Amino acid sequence: MQIKISDGAESVLDRLHRKGYEAYIAGGAVRDCVMGKTPHDYDIATSARPDEVKKIFKKVIDTGIAHGTVTVIEGGSGYEITTFRKEGGYSDSRHPDSVEFVGSIRDDLERRDFTINAMCYSPQTGVIDYFGGIEDIKAGIVRAVGEAKRRFGEDALRMLRAVRFCAALGFKLEDSTAAAIKSCAPLIKRVSSERLLGELNKILISDHPDAVALLHELGLMRYILPELEVCFSTPQKNKYHIYNVGDHIICATAAAEKDLILRWAALLHDIGKPACISTDSNGIIHFYGHHKESAAMAKDILYRLHMDHDSIRDILLLIENHDVRIEASPPAVKRMLAKLGDKLFLKLLSLQIADNRAKDGKYFAEKQKRIDEVRAVYEDIVAEGQPYLLSDLVINGRDLIKIGFKAGREIGDTLKLLLGEGVISSELNNRDYLLSRAREFRNKYSQKGE
């Protein structure tokens, strides 16, 4: 089977071949080409040792030379070139604990994770597929190469990667591979937070983010996101909900737009419900204060996973406000805009839509109409340039100092009061009026000081 690869990748293979070495495109690039997709990058497996590769190419970077990998720069692109090898397992990090160079491409492919990633290609040989990767692509399944438990024992992250490939490709797990993950699930505790976060991000940003439910089904969630695991045994008995908390969360995540911050917020927006559950005299279940509890728990989870601070801040703001019923009025919309900013405000509306899509459908049209009305008010505010941020005021701290204010908290508090008036009516955002009101506030401060 012949496939189309980039000219640069073909040039690298050709130069290695002309020096008498075996060389193949290997792994995900072959999978993508077989599926008719354009690879993002090309990894090359070769019989040449790193020092031999360096003699052939001018621009070579030692990106992983201890593990047999160098990066060749050819035609402005980078190509990772790795000597045929077998690995001695991963205790935690991205790189194997030990590496043994081997003499054949088959041995190299045999150590890889899944059949769909264990193919190689060169123009001379076509696609080489020892382990049935092409058939598994046709069948739409993710299957471990060889003995699944051994593959997962070598690197426990492969269990999460299996879920990621299901999410990215829309595939299903092959039965024996799924059974091996259930058996080996506790091994995931060996994996660093950074590696877990990388795979979780890829699952959530995929076309099938609801594949995160596989973590629950395979027994991985209790070790990765135990706060979410308990949600699947928490019922929701009220007229708006038809799912337990866990299934509702999965549906909301699937309904969220393809944005990583938004999907993390959807995944964690209700995780505080089990801690807030109560039942009234009519048997109706309530979760009072769950938005605050969910935000507090989400903060712990995201810091545990070593997510960056800016992303954590945005996700927590969305979770804290996901249940806020915003009135479709300029003052109410401006107050939320002042709190979130325009980009996060729009994400909040998207989160609320996703949240409502994951409830009883007969109430959705009414909820969508209300949110659409809020969005329309927002669009008018933006189109008319109405103020909602301190920077939108026509005066600033320097203007207040000129009329007698002292630098410090007094200025900040006064500007916030003035913005509050501007939020009510954009006509009040005029220099003379705001300075007049500022003098009134200044007199009040002075009287308090006396």
Image (spheres, rainbow, N blue to C red):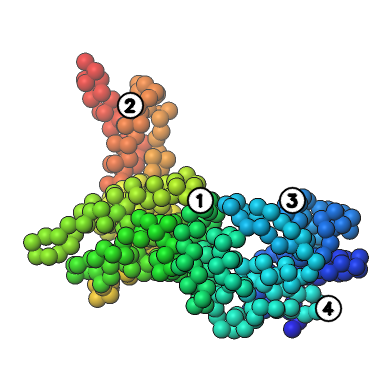
Q: Position of residue 142 (x, y in %)?
A: 55, 75
Looking at the image, is mark 2 or mark 1 nearer the viewer? Answer: 1
Q: Is residue 66 above or below residue 106?
A: above
The residue indicated by pointer 1 is 193
Q: Residue at x 21, y 15 (%)?
A: 450
- For residue 124, which numbered disc appears in the image? 4
N-terminal of the pair, mark 2 or mark 3, is 3
The residue indicated by pointer 2 is 410
Q: Secondary structure at mark 4?
A: loop
N-terminal of the pair, mark 3 or mark 1, is 3
Label 3 sits on what residue type? Answer: Ala
Q: Which of the two residues, 85 or 242, is positioned nearer the viewer here?
A: 85
Label 1 sits on what residue type? Answer: Ser
The residue indicated by pointer 3 is 66
**Distance from the alpha carbon under mark 1 to that under mark 4:** 42 Å
Q: Please rate how many residues cluster around mark 2, counting C-alpha atoms within 10 Å: few if below 14, some from 14 to 19, many from 20.
A: some
Drawn side of residue 264 relative to residue 292, left or right: right
Q: Please rate how many residues cluster around mark 1, counting C-alpha atoms within 10 Å: few if below 14, some from 14 to 19, many from 20.
A: some
Q: Residue at x 49, y 78 (%)?
A: 175
Q: Secondary structure at mark 3?
A: helix
Label 2 sits on what residue type? Answer: Glu
Q: Position of residue 315 (x, y in %)?
A: 41, 52
Q: Does the residue at mark 2 contact the one at mark 3 (Cβ under 8 Å)?
A: no
**Distance from the alpha carbon under mark 3 to that under mark 1:** 24 Å
Q: Position of residue 12 (x, y in %)?
A: 82, 65
Q: Is residue 228 above or below residue 18?
A: above
Residue 269 seen by the camera: no
Looking at the image, is mark 2 or mark 4 nearer the viewer? Answer: 4
